[in-house]
Amino acid sequence: MSNIKNLKEFAQLAGVSTATISRALSGTGRVSEETRQRIATLADRLGYQPNVTARNLRTQRTMTVGVLVPLGHEAAQHLSDPFFNTMTGFLADALSDHGYDLLLSRVLPKSDRWLDRYIGSGKVDGIIVIGQSTEFAVIETVSRRYLPMVVWGGQVSGQHHCSVGSDNRAGGILAARHLIERGCRRIAFAGPTRGPEFGERLQGVKQVLHEQGLSETLIELPSHFEPEAAFADILAQLDGIAELPDGIVAGSDVTAIGVLRALQELQVDVPGRVKVIGYDGLPVGAQVSPPLTTVDQQLRRGAGLMVELLLRRLAGEATESRMIAPNLILRSST
Amino acid sequence: MSNIKNLKEFAQLAGVSTATISRALSGTGRVSEETRQRIATLADRLGYQPNVTARNLRTQRTMTVGVLVPLGHEAAQHLSDPFFNTMTGFLADALSDHGYDLLLSRVLPKSDRWLDRYIGSGKVDGIIVIGQSTEFAVIETVSRRYLPMVVWGGQVSGQHHCSVGSDNRAGGILAARHLIERGCRRIAFAGPTRGPEFGERLQGVKQVLHEQGLSETLIELPSHFEPEAAFADILAQLDGIAELPDGIVAGSDVTAIGVLRALQELQVDVPGRVKVIGYDGLPVGAQVSPPLTTVDQQLRRGAGLMVELLLRRLAGEATESRMIAPNLILRSST
DNA sequence: GGCGGTTGTGGAATCGATTGTGCATTGCTG
DNA sequence: CAGCAATGCACAATCGATTCCACAACCGCC
């Protein structure tokens, strides 16, 4: 369709200078309404589009945001994890609403300089990191000299980097209270124990049990992140247990789904005999059987918030970390 | 860490010309081993990294591939769809293995020129489109003048663009045969009826039934794409049915999960009374209960293949479309 | 010692846009 | 009608790298 290669060529055809065309199309600067119209229609007809790379070089902006997913030790860890994928999707939407593109990178944090490398290349205007976990220290260091960065994850006191995440402790409280209201007395917490987010959720649960004088009954069911491994972990532990809990708080929806499968395998009725509540609010939770009651982190809102904060940081503003108040999604597993 | 802003500054510090530095770091051209070493260590110490935008402009390559997900009429259609998210993840891995970045874009194909716009901007060296569906015609047109494009989807005879996808008809055959081997006689096909991929799968099923003299017993259970809507569609139809099928082929894993939920709701035993087989091979299929038997499209391999073909096209080669032979993943739902 | 050939390096053009500055031209005011 | 401001446009610098070309130094050989 378009035979036009670059601005200069277009300018010759239009009989004006490149400067005028640039200004006419961008709407900045003084151009007569008449020529603006003429150039606009001509551009449309010839299918001219400015070269983004050249523009980026000149303007020193790329209109692109890097989304980094740090993978854990096992490279395959997050591949089948619906959480990261769902989050990435929401981010793509939120960013494109603001005219930004999303450069997706999964990184294996081998050295401590994975973040520096990414930043230094100048490919992106800012970055969003999904999950702190083992990389907390690196993120914290980098945040002191690199401003346009927002991280999904928990917020600890004294933390320097800007994070967005749900209030994990409040979420844990919400989950435990719900189970107790439903009549549970022997409560278990299933899920990974590493990672600040999960720890906070567990603390929330413990706090409620303590208030209710049920502390000593908390059962801990540690598990891996990865869905299949989590299922195996949970199954092994539940299978050998003397007395089943009557309510299980899972550290994530992925874990919760593993718990449901394990209970199914053991032919334990959910929610009749054991009630299960997840954490995340992933769409997939509605698709399992029984549909999963869960603590909703409002990922869509979280993604929107991260983008908003990042844009403010790009504008030079200093922004505070934000916690999102979690809320319950009641379905059939409790 | 690094106070170095650009090549020129670095060159002054190093006491050589920019040309030499560029050659030393890229390893192209003639540079004495001694200076190469010196510059390499200096670059490392100063944390110098070449500006990617400038390099892209000069070399006319971006080392970036655009991954386009055309959304249907409903913008929310694919957000909760694990298929796209899983595929995107695999593509990210395959691309980064070859040093390419992944620019993710979800597009609402409002006009016919969404593809042209994307291509013309020069942001990417090539593109991968996930799913043809309603945009088949646009893709076909563009493919005649824009070479570096590979599409995930079916392959129809006479098709010009390069596609990678599973052999949908063969997959349908595989699924139907499996159910019949398991003793099913009243077979149903559940899933969206639009879209070339699903049509082919249905054809495969029909072919098997025809061969077995079971043609007239095929029950069709049309449904939407979107998980929740699919569940509702299936439930409504199964609820009102005179005689239940004893085997159900689902057009996708998402549909299959909806089928499982509907059957659970109706308290129909799976696989005892009805057997269910999905299509896709998504990881999430292993996480539902009962774990889903499914036709595996080998998405990871598919993603790798798309990247490989795209790279060949970038090198100017003409490539043929490829079909991936599907295979069964046997789990507990059949 | 002169000469072709290799090797290492620097100068400068180049990629394609954006944008500050300057120069006509036009319009308005007193 | 002089003088000044506003308007519309072109020229050229600029962003930061890569790479073509030229050139000097050095080598070995006759």
Image (cartoon, coloured by chain):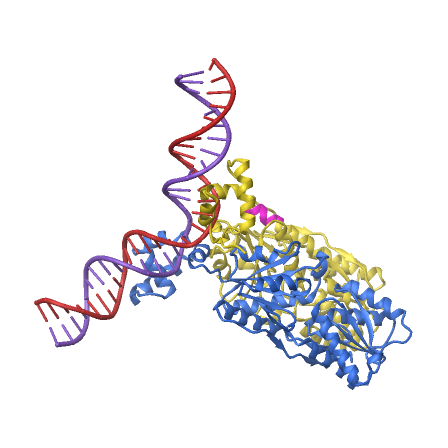
Chain colours: A blue, B yellow, C purple, D red
**Hey, which quadrant is residue A328 in on the image?**
bottom right
Q: Residue at x 56, y 47 (%)?
A: B313
In the picture, which quadrant includes the C terminus of chain B?
A: bottom right
The chief SS type of the magenta part is helix
Above or below, C2 against B57 in this view is above
Question: Total number of numbered labels?
Answer: 0
Residue B314 is one of the magenta-drawn residues: yes
Residue A61, image x and y in percent?
46, 60
Determine whether B324 is above or below A330 in the image: above
Measured along the vertical axis of the image, is residue B20 above or below residue B164?
A: above
Residue B66 versus residue A235: which sits nearer the camera?
A235
* Image coords of residue B122 (percent x, y): 48, 54
Front one among A208 and A259: A208
Decide if residue A199 is on the left or right side of residue B70: right
Indicate the position of residue B187 as horizontal and vertical percent values.
Answer: 78, 66
Q: Report whether residue B334 is seen.
A: no
Residue beneath the point at 64% across and 75% down: A298
Please say whether residue B174 is one of the residues in the magenta stretch: no
Q: In this view, does A150 lie to the left or right of A242?
A: left
Q: What stretch of residues is rendered in magenta?
A: B308-316
Looking at the image, which residue is at 79% across and 82% down? A210
The N terminus of chain B: image quadrant: bottom right
